[in-house]
Image (cartoon, coloured by chain):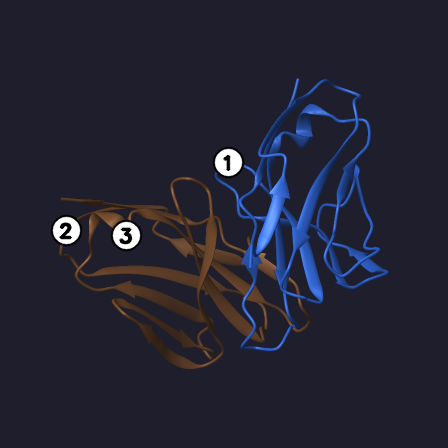
Chain colours: A blue, B brown
């Protein structure tokens, strides 16, 4: 199993541009998450999904959109990129929310908005 | 006040030392997670616990639900333990709230 994969690894955007961060997991996990990590801060939840067709906002959803058309894929869309969206983005997945099910993280996407 | 507070923020230890990282939280939780973030950025789950104590190799995690406090211990520390250790609490539901992390450096 590849686990959780993210593309791209790095990206530089200009202010106002749009892009999609891709996330795929091959573990048949129901739950998927998008986080952002800013220097010196804890990870913040952007959006999450408990299954195909179901998504919900996390703590910092403004400026982002998601979709979950399949169990495997959970892309994160940035519309009208702003410097405040410069961050490292992590996708994660989990089988269910049961106590014994850990979260598996992707390798991250480092995004810079100039 | 953050929901999850970790201490210390930075920790430097000599190889072989016993290390303790603390995590305090302010909300009711269903579980607490300890994660490790490698210098290259990857994040792996170390422990999930809702009571008592868990051990894996040289790592031990404990939690006191009444005091809303957890500790991560590393015995016989080694330079390869150098990483950021992150505490996260799971409120009733499926979302995690993360601490800012403890940067650990173990010198040989």
Find residue A6 and report its image quarter. Answer: top right
Mark 3–mark 2 Cα distance, whole angstroms, equals 10 Å
Left or right of residue A107, residue A72 in this image: right
Q: Name the residue under label 1.
A: A39
Image vertical order of residue A11 relative to residue B92, above or below: above
Q: Which of A85 and A1 is in front in this view?
A: A1
Mark 1–mark 3 Cα distance, whole angstroms, equals 21 Å
Expressed as whole percent of the image width and height from the top left, the position of residue A88 reads: 58, 37
Question: Judging from the image, what secondary structure is the residue with disc 2 in?
Answer: loop
Expressed as whole percent of the image width and height from the top left, the position of residue A58 reads: 73, 54
- Chain under disc 3: B
- Chain under disc 1: A
- Quarter of the image for the C terminus of chain B: give it: top left
Residue at 36%, 77% in the rendered image:
B54
Q: Do the residues labelled 1 and 3 touch (CB within 8 Å)?
A: no
Q: Mark 2 points at which residue?
A: B15
Image vertical order of residue A52 relative to residue B14, above or below: below
Residue at 28%, 65% in the rendered image:
B73
Q: Name the residue under label 3.
A: B81
Mark 2–mark 1 Cα distance, whole angstroms, equals 27 Å
- Chain under disc 2: B
Find residue A19 and report its image quarter. Answer: top right
Q: Which of B28 and B95 is in front in this view?
A: B95
């Amino acid at each position: 199993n590849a686990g959780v994969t993210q593309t791209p690894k790095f990206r530089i955007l200009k202010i106002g541009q749009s892009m999609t961060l891709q996330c795929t997991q091959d573990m048949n996990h129901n739950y998927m998450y998008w986080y952002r990590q800013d220097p010196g801060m804890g990870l913040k939840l952007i959006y999450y999904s408990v299954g195909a067709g179901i998504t919900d906002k996390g703590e910092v959803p403004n400026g982002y959109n998601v979709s979950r058309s399949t169990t495997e894929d959970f892309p994160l869309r940035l519309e009208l990129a702003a410097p405040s969206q410069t961050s490292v983005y992590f996708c994660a997945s989990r089988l269910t929310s049961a106590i014994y099910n850990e979260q598996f993280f992707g390798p991250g996407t480092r995004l810079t908005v100039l | 006040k953050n929901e999850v507070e970790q201490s210390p923020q930075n920790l430097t230890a000599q190889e072989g030392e016993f290390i303790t990282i603390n995590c305090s939280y302010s909300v009711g939780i269903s579980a607490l997670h300890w994660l490790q973030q490698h210098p290259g950025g990857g994040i792996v789950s170390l422990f999930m616990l809702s009571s008592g104590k868990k051990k894996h190799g040289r790592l031990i995690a404990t939690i006191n639900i009444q005091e809303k406090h957890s500790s991560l211990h590393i015995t016989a520390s080694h330079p390869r333990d150098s990483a950021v250790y992150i505490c996260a609490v799971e409120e009733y539901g499926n979302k995690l709230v993360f601490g800012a992390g403890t940067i650990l450096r173990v010198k040989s």
